[in-house]
Image (spheres, grey):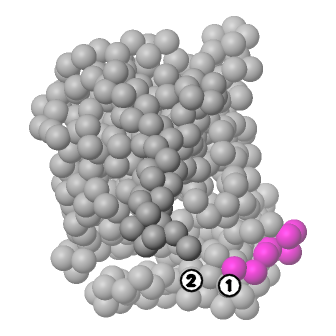
């Protein structure tokens, strides 16, 4: 029988041999990050430095630019506005529904913040209920950029949605019923806001209430019936998220949502069309990073192709290119809501450990400058078998062209 010390030495040597390739691959990735990173200096909404120079050149060469973000960081709307200044897009595509997009377009044309609207319909502008996000919309409107929303009807908007239906209904009984329901959901939403809990009228509705909505609008025109169908589809998706049961067509809630957003992208009708032979003009996207990858989404709970994959195909179909930028914070604070009554619950702190798979990039971002990493060399190394990485890291490399790391973030402000 081997001597215990010899056996221990054997295990030490074995672990060293097993760990060697992993360390080598980690070293390869670290080396590639160091070789292809550049500083970006942020001064308010102004950006400079070698990192910004490289991004600006890549933006200028692209038909679509997709900014995959971590929501609720105050620095990202300013960065997006700077990207827009370079790209000069005709369309801004956002992770909101088409009806919120219409209200945002209207509100951005008015002076001052949308405080009265948000008091009437709490959190009904989705992410754009936050100050920096709303100011981004106002900045883009000043540049005559069309705002388009792709998402399902937002869960906080039942009161506003019913009010909008009432405005468009022709039948007097239907209009009266919708107005009554809108007032009910408005009062309910304000109570939920005061309670400070994640309760929303749409999620509180019973299926019978949605069936009643369909019935009361059955004799209305096609525009109202389409709105009702959009609401019903969204309601079913939200309920399926909660129950985790498949929809009647067999799809998961997440897949149904992605399919809806991609259909809406295909149906965009730009106010300023592209040039001859290019039906789609320059477009700027801003969604959560899960949605804007070139290939399989970085979402860790399955395999999904998302909006970014379709945008890549649409750009290539025009013999153009899409540019995919992922922007994250290393640490700091982040908005997790926009409650106007219980503001303390809107902000949460986070650290680099919360996104451990990005640690190789965080380790190279000491601050105060932001860090811009060109991911394409690492992607080529991965494809050539010279780099081994975790599944989530592989998807980042395959999905995004650049990673922008903000060393310290602050939460977006609540109005």
Task: Indicate left or right for 209 with 133 as reference.
Answer: right
Q: Residue at x 12, y 37 (%)?
A: 368
- Whether 169 is drawn above or below 113: the answer is below
**Circle 2/circle 1 CB separation < 8 Å:** no
Disc 2: CA contacts within 10 A as few (<14), some (14-19) or many (>=20): some
Q: Which segment is the magenta one? A: 244-250
Front residue of this view, candidates 197 and 40: 40
- Whether 387 is drawn above or below 241: the answer is above
In this view of the protein, can residue 196 be seen by the observer?
yes
In this view of the protein, can residue 167 be seen by the observer?
no
Q: Compare marks 2 and 1 and give the one earlier in the sequence.
A: 2
Q: Which of label 2 and label 1 is nearer to you?
A: 1
Residue 243, disc: 1
- Whether 19 is drawn above or below 64: the answer is below
Quadrant in the picture for the N terminus? bottom right
Q: Residue furthest top?
A: 276
- Whether 246 is drawn above or below 195: the answer is above
Q: Residue at x 85, y 70 (%)?
A: 250
Q: Residue furthest right?
A: 249
- What residue does disc 2 label? 203
Q: Position of residue 355 (x, y in %)?
A: 38, 57
Residue 263 located within the stretch drawn in magenta? no
Residue 38, disc: none
């Amino acid at each position: 029988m081997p001597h215990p010390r010899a056996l221990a030495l054997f295990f030490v040597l074995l672990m060293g041999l097993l760990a060697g390739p992993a360390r080598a691959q980690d070293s390869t990735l670290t080396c590639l990050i160091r070789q292809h990173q550049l500083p970006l200096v942020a001064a308010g909404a102004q950006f400079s430095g070698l990192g910004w120079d490289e991004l600006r050149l890549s933006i200028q060469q692209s038909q679509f630019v997709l900014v995959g973000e971590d929501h609720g960081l105050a620095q990202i709307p300013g960065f997006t506005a700077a990207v827009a200044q370079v790209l000069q897009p005709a369309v801004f595509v956002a992770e909101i529904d088409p009806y919120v997009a219409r209200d945002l377009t209207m509100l951005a044309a008015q002076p001052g913040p949308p405080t009265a609207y948000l008091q009437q319909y709490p959190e009904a502008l989705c992410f754009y209920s936050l100050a920096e996000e709303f100011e981004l919309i106002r900045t883009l409107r000043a540049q005559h950029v069309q705002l388009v929303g792709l998402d399902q009807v937002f869960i906080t908007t039942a009161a506003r949605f019913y009010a909008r239906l009432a405005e468009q209904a022709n039948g007097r009984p239907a209009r009266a019923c919708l107005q009554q329901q809108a007032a009910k959901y408005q009062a309910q939403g304000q109570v939920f806001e005061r309670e400070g809990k994640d309760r929303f009228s749409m999620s509180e509705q019973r299926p019978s209430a949605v069936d009643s909505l369909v019935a009361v609008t059955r004799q209305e025109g096609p525009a109202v019936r389409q709105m009702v169908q959009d609401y019903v589809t969204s309601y079913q998706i939200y309920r399926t998220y909660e129950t985790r049961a498949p929809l009647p067509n067999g799809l998961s809630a997440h897949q149904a949502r992605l399919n809806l957003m991609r259909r809406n992208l295909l149906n965009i009708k730009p106010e300023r069309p592209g040039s001859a032979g290019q039906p789609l003009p320059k477009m700027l996207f801003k969604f959560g990073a899960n949605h804007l990858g070139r290939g399989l989404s970085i979402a860790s709970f399955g395999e999904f192709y998302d909006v970014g994959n379709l945008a890549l195909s649409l750009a290539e179909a025009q013999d153009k290119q899409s540019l995919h930028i992922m922007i994250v914070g290393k640490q700091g604070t982040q908005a997790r809501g926009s409650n106007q009554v219980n503001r303390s619950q809107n902000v949460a702190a986070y650290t680099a450990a919360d996104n451990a798979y990005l640690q190789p990039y965080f380790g190279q971002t000491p601050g105060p400058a932001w860090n811009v990493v060109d991911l394409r060399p690492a992607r080529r190394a991965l494809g050539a078998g010279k780099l081994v990485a975790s599944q989530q890291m592989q998807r980042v490399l395959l999905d995004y062209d650049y990673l922008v790391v903000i060393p310290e973030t602050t939460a977006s402000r609540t109005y």
